[in-house]
Image (tube, helix red, strand yellow):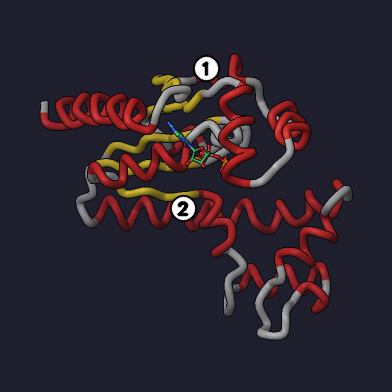
Amino acid sequence: MKIIGLTGGIGSGKSTAAQILAELGAKVIDADKVAHEVFSPGTEGLQKVVETFGEGVLDSNGKIDRKKLGEIVFNNPSALSILNGIIHPRAYELTKSRLDEFSKQGVEVVVLEVILLVEAGWDHLADEIWVTVATEDTVINRLQKSRGLTKEEIITRIHAQTPNEERIKYADVVIENDGSYEELEAKLNELWSRIRDKNSA
Ligand code: ATP
């Protein structure tokens, strides 16, 4: 089984690329979604979050109210690091067990989409690292439209992240995504054929 670690900056097109790869036949694990599953109802993760931050983080249905939790950790680095200490190891274990399940099922290609793939030390789970890259102008244009963020908000977020030059250094494949959706699809089709050829060689 081949595991592609897919990463890239905010709005660079990771999720769009992952979706195209899923249509081509890859199984996708989105680390962000896994992180939310860690404290879904009935989990030990949820219990731990409540023990740590109090019952005030629950909504009326007993689920974690992400807005309330967000308010607690916003601008509070030590609370954020405690929360990350609860979420990250559990998300990592859950991801590993999901990879094991896929491997047992005979899945050939898994795309592991992680925004902090290298920064969080998850890169060693992947056989190859693919990085989506788009210019600041492209990201601003796209996110203003799709997420209703202001230009200033987008620039602040881009600058808070690892710069593209750093990401490119560890990339096995750089996917430049400043063109149309069709162009992105064409690039991924080509990359997909390449891995399929390698897998069957
Ligand atoms: P984040 O890390 O913030 O979740 P991301 O890297 O997953 O972002 P996407 O959500 O895939 O990025 O893309 C950001 C926005 O840009 C989306 O609205 C998506 O539809 C759009 N987009 C991505 N690639 C293209 C493209 N090639 N052509 C047109 N729109 C695109």
Q: What is the residue that sits farthest to the front in this orientation?
A: 145
User: With 64 as the anchor, is 10 left or right in this view?
Assistant: left
| Residue designated by label 2 | 95
User: With 174 as the anchor, is 146 left or right in this view?
Assistant: right
Say the numbered circle drawn on residue 28: none
Q: What amino acid is labelled 2 in the image?
A: Thr
- Local crowd size for mark 2, using a 10 Å CA cut-off: few (<14), some (14–19), many (≥20): many
Picture coordinates of residue 146, whole percent (x, y) = 57, 44
The residue sitting at 71% across, 52% down in the picture is: 84
The residue sitting at 62% across, 72% down in the picture is: 44
| Residue 42 to residue 139: above or below | below
Question: At numbered mark 2, what does the secondary structure look like: helix, strand or loop?
Answer: helix
> Which quarter of the figure has residue 9?
top right
The residue sitting at 52% across, 49% down in the picture is: 31
User: With 87 as the anchor, is 103 left or right in this view?
Assistant: left
Q: Quadrant of the C terminus?
A: top left
Picture coordinates of residue 150, whole percent (x, y) = 73, 38
The residue sitting at 46% across, 42% down in the picture is: 15
First in sequence, mark 1 or 2: give its number: 2
Q: Quadrant of the N terminus?
A: top left
| Residue designated by label 1 | 168
| Gap in angstroms between the C-alphas marked 1 and 2 | 24 Å
Viewer-side label of 1, 2? 1
- Local crowd size for mark 1, using a 10 Å CA cut-off: few (<14), some (14–19), many (≥20): some
> Which quarter of the figure has residue 183?
top left
| Residue 91 to residue 45: above or below | above
Q: What amino acid is labelled 1 in the image?
A: Ile
Near-viewer residue (61 or 89): 61
Residue contact between numbered discs 1 and 2, judged by CB atoms under 8 Å: no
Picture coordinates of residue 43, whole percent (x, y) = 58, 74
Picture coordinates of residue 192, whole percent (x, y) = 24, 31
